[in-house]
Image (cartoon, rainbow, N blue to C red):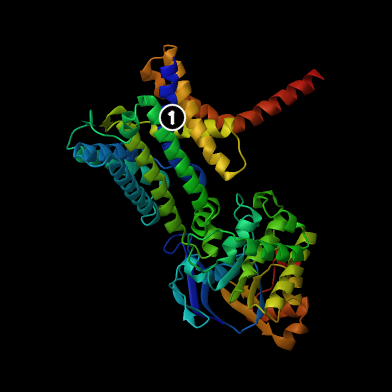
């Protein structure tokens, strides 16, 4: 049982990085970006291929992140320069990435990196157990990322990106190019998602072209769980809540699997959870007026 | 300061909904001019302002701002010359960001956004001072989200933002139309004060005849995408509503029949 919980926590921390990426598009930029379903396996594929070629795993992860940024830039250019709706731009990038990911992995749907060095190995070599070293690497990375983002979104550039997600007309009236801000935001987001993919692949010792399927819904589920359970006013707190949300999501999944849910039903379960969570704000309102009218009738 | 030459704008060109919003509009503003623009619905007032601001490209003509031809410049590049306040109070501010962040965005209008801090402490003190002058109590709510403010407060803030870095030209697009009469008056007073203090060249669209006559040193009345009436100086000082209606009838060959303008 402890092993199951530790496994869930460690995986949750790796997925937390992806959740932070989803937050940047979905909440900060107000764009539902589906390219992440392609950039997650992109990061995994790039990192694994480089590691099989004996590249340093840290360098491989960094390159994977940069590839994610490039993919995000493509989505941004499709959306801003070709004026394709954001949702569709993301779908186009995601679809194109399937072929690209296959090519990166040498026209094979998966690449294994068994017994190769990974970002988790140095700690394991010090005698730490696999889950614990994952937790340490995941936690340090996640904290580092939210600290950098906290600083970045406080700068002039970061403020301009936040404002773009808020009111584009006002932002243009202040002399800011909203196209550039959207492209930048999508690049940061997809870079983080690819980094998350690189870590996840190194943890499971393989990259799979299908591993991105449903990832946007997992990201949204973690994001909403974080926001609902750890409601925070400050920006740092909100970023930290994303990490906690990703952890709680993994714990829930570990639990329902433990209680005998068919793993194939997981995606249905997650989709229903997200649908309910997205409905929650309206649902609360309906419930409130409903109970009010009930009380009135009783009186 | 501003020169508009033979400006033409057609919406939905080539369709049944084709609408010539501006045709052959010529207008020259001198430094320090405060011009009120009045006209009925569809006269082209907002289209003129939006063309100057670069919200959409124009079909013909030129727009020269401060000796620079900006006709082909995108909206965000023209912003360095312009301060803008919109009719919708929600339009001029970022609702999820706080008051000081909004002011800081406006303070950097026309400048490259770098990795320096979005709001510095020195700025905060300056903003507090400026907000105090608005007399709306906003100086004590600088870290409140702008979304929490009322329409009037948001419009006052937008006005402050538009003038924070003195623009070459201030564009006010019916900026008091969505406010209740008392708040509208307050925002108008504030407009007069800010324009006067900073000697700003201003184009103010309004549908309120009284305001159009009372404010500014020059009045333009638009009709069907043309400038129908253009009076300035002493003539403008002595202008009455009746004069204005007669001038309009004489220049356009039709009676002024617009409730929104006549009743206000």
Above or below, comparing residue B146 to residue A136 in the picture:
below
Q: State the residue in front, B5 or A99.
A: A99
Question: What is the x, y in percent for residue A42?
Answer: 29, 40
Quadrant of the drawing holding the C terminus of chain A: top right
Q: Is residue A265 left or right of residue A274?
A: left
Q: At 56% from the left edge and 31% from the top edge, which residue is drawn?
A: A279
Q: At 72% from the left edge and 57% from the top edge, which residue is drawn?
A: B153
Q: State the residue in front, B181 or B191.
A: B191
Question: What is the x, y in percent for residue B93?
Answer: 61, 57
Q: Which residue is mark 1?
A: A12
Element at badge 1? helix
Question: What is the x, y in percent for residue A273?
Answer: 49, 25
Q: Is residue A116 visible?
A: yes
Q: Is residue B92 visible?
A: no
Question: What is the x, y in percent for residue B216?
Answer: 71, 78
Q: State the residue in front, B107 or A31.
A: B107
Above or below, comparing residue B211 to residue B95 in the picture:
below
Quadrant of the drawing holding the N terminus of chain A: top left
Above or below, comparing residue B132 to residue A270 in the picture:
below
Given the current orientation, which residue lies at the most extreme left position?
Answer: A106
Chain letter belonging to callout 1:
A
The part of the image, by quadrant, that contains residue B105 is bottom right
Q: Is residue A290 left or right of residue B12?
A: right
- Number of marks: 1
Given the current orientation, which residue lies at the most extreme front position?
Answer: A126
């Amino acid at each position: 049982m402890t092993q199951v919980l530790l496994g869930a926590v460690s995986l949750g921390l790796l997925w937390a990085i992806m959740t932070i990426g989803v937050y940047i598009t979905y909440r900060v930029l107000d764009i539902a970006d589906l390219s992440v379903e392609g950039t997650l396996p992109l990061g995994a594929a790039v990192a694994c291929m480089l590691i099989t070629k004996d590249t340093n795993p840290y360098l491989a992860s960094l390159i994977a992140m940069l590839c994610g940024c490039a993919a995000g830039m493509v989505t941004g250019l499709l959306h801003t320069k070709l004026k394709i709706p954001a949702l569709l731009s993301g779908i186009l990038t995601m679809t194109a990435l399937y072929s690209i990911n296959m090519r990166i992995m040498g026209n094979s749907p998966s690449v294994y990196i068994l017994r190769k060095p990974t970002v988790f190995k140095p700690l394991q070599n010090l005698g730490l157990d696999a889950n614990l070293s994952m937790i340490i690497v995941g936690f340090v990375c996640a904290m580092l990322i939210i600290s950098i983002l906290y600083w970045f979104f406080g700068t002039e550039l970061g403020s301009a990106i936040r404002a773009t997600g808020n009111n584009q007309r006002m932002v243009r009236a202040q002399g800011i190019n909203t196209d550039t801000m959207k492209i930048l935001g999508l690049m940061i987001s997809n870079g983080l998602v690819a980094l998350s993919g690189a870590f996840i692949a190194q943890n499971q010792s393989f990259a799979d072209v299908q591993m991105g399927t449903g990832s946007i819904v997992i990201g949204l589920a973690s994001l909403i769980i974080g926001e609902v359970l750890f409601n925070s006013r400050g920006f740092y707190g909100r970023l930290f809540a994303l990490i906690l949300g990703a952890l709680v999501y993994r714990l829930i999944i570990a639990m329902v699997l433990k209680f005998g849910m068919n793993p194939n039903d997981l995606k249905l379960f997650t989709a229903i959870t997200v649908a309910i969570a997205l409905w929650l704000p309206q649902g609360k309102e309906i419930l409130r007026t409903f109970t009010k009218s009930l009380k009135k009738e009783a009186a | 300061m501003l020169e508009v030459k033979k400006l033409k704008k057609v919406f939905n060109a080539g369709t049944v909904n084709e609408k010539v919003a501006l045709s052959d509009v010529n207008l020259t503003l001198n430094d320090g001019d405060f011009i009120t623009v009045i006209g009925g619905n569809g006269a082209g007032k907002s289209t003129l302002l939006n063309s100057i601001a670069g919200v959409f490209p124009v079909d013909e003509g030129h727009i020269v701002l401060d000796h620079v031809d900006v006709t082909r410049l995108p909206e965000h590049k023209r912003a360095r010359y312009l301060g803008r306040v919109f009719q919708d109070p929600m339009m001029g501010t970022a609702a999820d960001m706080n008051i000081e962040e909004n002011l800081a965005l406006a303070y950097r209008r026309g400048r490259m956004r770098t990795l320096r801090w979005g709001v510095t402490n020195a700025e905060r003190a300056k903003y507090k001072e400026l907000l105090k002058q608005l007399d709306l109590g906003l100086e004590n709510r600088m870290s409140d989200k702008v979304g929490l403010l009322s329409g009037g407060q948001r419009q006052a803030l937008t006005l402050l933002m538009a003038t924070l870095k003195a623009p070459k030209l201030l564009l006010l697009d019916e900026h008091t139309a969505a406010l209740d009469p008392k708040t509208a008056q307050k925002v108008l007073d504030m407009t007069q004060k800010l324009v006067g203090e900073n000697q700003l060249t201003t184009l103010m669209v309004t549908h309120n005849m009284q305001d159009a006559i009372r404010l500014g040193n020059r009045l333009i009345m638009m009709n069907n995408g043309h400038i129908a009436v253009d009076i300035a100086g002493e003539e403008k000082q002595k202008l009455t509503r009746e004069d204005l209606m007669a001038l309009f009838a004489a220049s356009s060959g039709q009676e002024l029949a617009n409730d929104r303008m006549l009743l206000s």
